[in-house]
């Protein structure tokens, strides 16, 4: 007698596993891959700029020079971590004189160099973004 071997059937959970694997594979093909960071991009270079400034205090005015090779389109200058002055455009290589009374605190009190000694100054350049410049005043 000739017996043909019985065909083995794939159980239902086997088919379910095959379908799930196929769906996973197909979805990985259609999912966009994340781009890796390129450290040589212009964005990476722009955010790693170091602010370069020259600052002098005359007794009534702060004399600030933009020593960078790029313009400061938006900067904030802070005296003693309290008194702030927001600038407009400060051209590369240009020097600006800012009266001490133009710096104000959070309550709009003006900086008075006859009452308070300016001890430190910080320049935050926000546009284009760059690392801060810090200096102590003697």
Image (cartoon, rainbow, N blue to C red):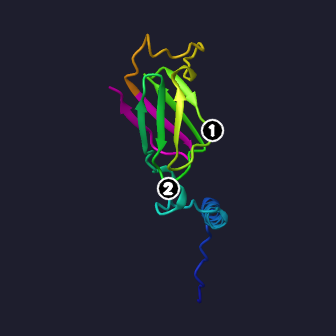
Question: Of 99 and 78, which appears nearest the observer?
Answer: 99
Does the magenta run of residues contain 136? yes
Q: Of the residues tagged 1 and 2, which is closer to the observer?
A: 1
Mark linked to residue 88: 1
Residue 33 lies, with reference to residue 105, above or below; the image says below
Question: Of 26 and 22, which appears nearest the observer?
Answer: 26
Structural distance between the alpha carbons of marks 1 and 2 = 24 Å
| Magenta segment | 121-138
| SS category of the residue bearing label 1 | loop
Residue 35 placement: quadrant: bottom right
Mark linked to residue 35: none
Specify which label sits upstream in the sequence, 1 or 2: 2
Mark linked to residue 44: 2
Q: Position of residue 62 (x, y in %)?
A: 47, 30
Residue 47 lies, with reference to residue 117, above or below; the image says below
Residue 101 placement: quadrant: top right
Please tell me which residue is depicted at 42% across the width and 27% down the height of the picture. 58
| SS category of the residue bearing label 2 | helix
Does the magenta run of residues contain 72? no
Crowd class of label 2 (few under 14; some 14 to 19; many from 20; radius 10 Å): few
Please tell me which residue is depicted at 63% across the width and 38% down the height of the picture. 88
Please tell me which residue is depicted at 47% across the width and 63% down the height of the picture. 40
Residue lying at the far top of the rendered structure: 115
């Amino acid at each position: 007698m000739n017996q043909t071997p019985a065909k083995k059937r794939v159980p239902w959970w086997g088919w379910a596993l095959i379908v799930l694997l196929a769906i996973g594979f197909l979805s990985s093909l259609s999912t966009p891959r994340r781009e890796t960071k390129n450290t040589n991009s212009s964005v990476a270079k722009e955010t790693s700029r170091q602010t370069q400034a020259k600052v002098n205090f005359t007794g009534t005015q702060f004399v600030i020079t933009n020593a960078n090779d790029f313009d400061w389109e938006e900067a904030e200058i802070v005296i003693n971590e309290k008194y702030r002055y927001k600038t407009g455009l400060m051209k590369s290589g240009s020097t600006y004189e800012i009266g001490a009374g133009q710096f104000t605190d959070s309550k709009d009190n003006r900086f008075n160099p006859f009452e308070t000694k300016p001890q430190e100054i910080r320049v935050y350049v926000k546009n284009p973004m760059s690392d801060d410049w810090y200096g102590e005043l003697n």
